[in-house]
Amino acid sequence: MSVRDVVACGVDGSRESLEAAEWAAERAKASGWELQIVCAYALPSYTAASMDSGFAAVDDDAIEASARAVVEEAAAHVADTGVRVTTLAQQGDPTGVLVDLSRSVRLVVVGTRGGGGFADRLLGATSSALPAYAHCPVVVVPRHEEGSRFVPVQRIVAGVDGSNQASQALSSAVAEAVAWGAELTAVETVPMASSAGALAWLPPAVDRSEILRDVRDQLRAACAKASEGTDVDVRSHALDGNAAMLLAEFSTAVDLVVVGSRGRGGVRGLLLGSTSQSVLAHSMCPVMVVPSRSKDYDEAPRPKWRRR
């Protein structure tokens, strides 16, 4: 299946989904891509619709019309960005529709805590569904506080842990820095200070500062490789601490956090790692989750990076 230069945005009529549409429109504009606004809707089953229990008959056409009204409202909301917008009201499960769509687009964007559709799928009972199963990066846009905005993206932080998934996330973070003209910082954490840390078992004779230096050197090499051929100068930091907590803290001072869907640990059945889940739940800025099956961003043309 060919990949289109499209940002797909799931909407459900909530304020949060309109904010996601704003972010998606600006991202599409940054690369000259198209924006596709999508609303998935479910029709009641025959059994439920035909029960003679005093309820009014369900009008399938009215449900579809309502979904179309949702996408048209979102399209009108971002009309002033000047991006090319197409709309799609499709019957089906919201997560399933977007996962299928992720096979043929560059990026999928959704909001959080919406009107019972996408948000519940992302941060509710099946919180890992879309980022875990998508075939392209997924950006989750949180509800912003009064007076704040998430675009343009000027500062990006990427969480790295040495895994293949993290390397893909770093490459995607570089692509975002190129598109937005943003500063990029890569952070790798090594939990050593706490007694609960992964390296707390190390004997006192071990030079922990040397461990951090080794991690820092490896991180710098990874950043150089990921940014090769671009004008992006990636800053890098190796820090002692918990990855999820530090990235959530960074989210208060940057415009985008980028993580991989899975790190080195975890159970095979849990496709979204604990760090990704925690960052999604606590981040104050948009989070991009890059799945291990993500399409190579190098397929898309990269504009030259320019600092604003």
Image (tube, rainbow, N blue to C red):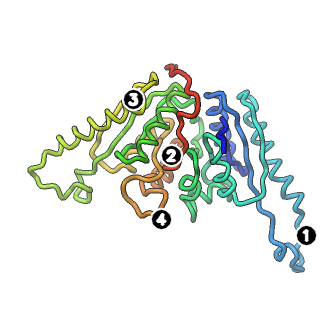
Q: Which residue is mark 3?
A: 234
| Residue at image location 22% in from the left, 54% down from the top | 199
Outermost bottom residue: 52
- Disc 4 secondary structure class: loop
Report whether 153 appears left or right of 108.
left
Q: In the rendered structure, which disc, 4 or 1, sits on the residue that comes first in sequence?
A: 1
Residue 18 position within the rendered picture, expressed as x and y whole percent measured from the top left:
69, 43
Outermost left residue: 205
Mark 3 → mark 1, Cα distance in angstroms = 59 Å
- Disc 1 secondary structure class: loop
Report whether 139 appears left or right of 22.
left
Give the image quarter of residue 113.
bottom right
Q: In the rendered structure, which disc, 3 or 1, sits on the residue that comes first in sequence?
A: 1
| Residue at image location 72% in from the left, 41% down from the top | 36
Q: Which residue is mark 2?
A: 290
Q: Which residue is mark 4?
A: 269
Give the image quarter of residue 35.
top right
Q: In the rendered structure, which disc, 3 or 2, sits on the residue that comes first in sequence?
A: 3
Q: Inspect the image, locate mark 4, and give the three-letter code of the amino acid beneath it.
A: Gly
Residue 169 position within the rendered picture, expressed as x and y whole percent measured from the top left:
46, 42
Mark 3 or mark 4: which is in front? 4
Decide if residue 19 is in sight here: no
Q: In the rendered structure, which disc, 2 or 4, sits on the residue that comes first in sequence?
A: 4
Residue 251 position within the rendered picture, expressed as x and y whole percent measured from the top left:
45, 41
Residue 247 position within the rendered picture, expressed as x and y whole percent measured from the top left:
41, 45
Mark 2 → mark 1, Cα distance in angstroms = 43 Å
Mark 2 → mark 4, Cα distance in angstroms = 17 Å
Q: Looking at this view, is 144 or 308 the one in front?
A: 308
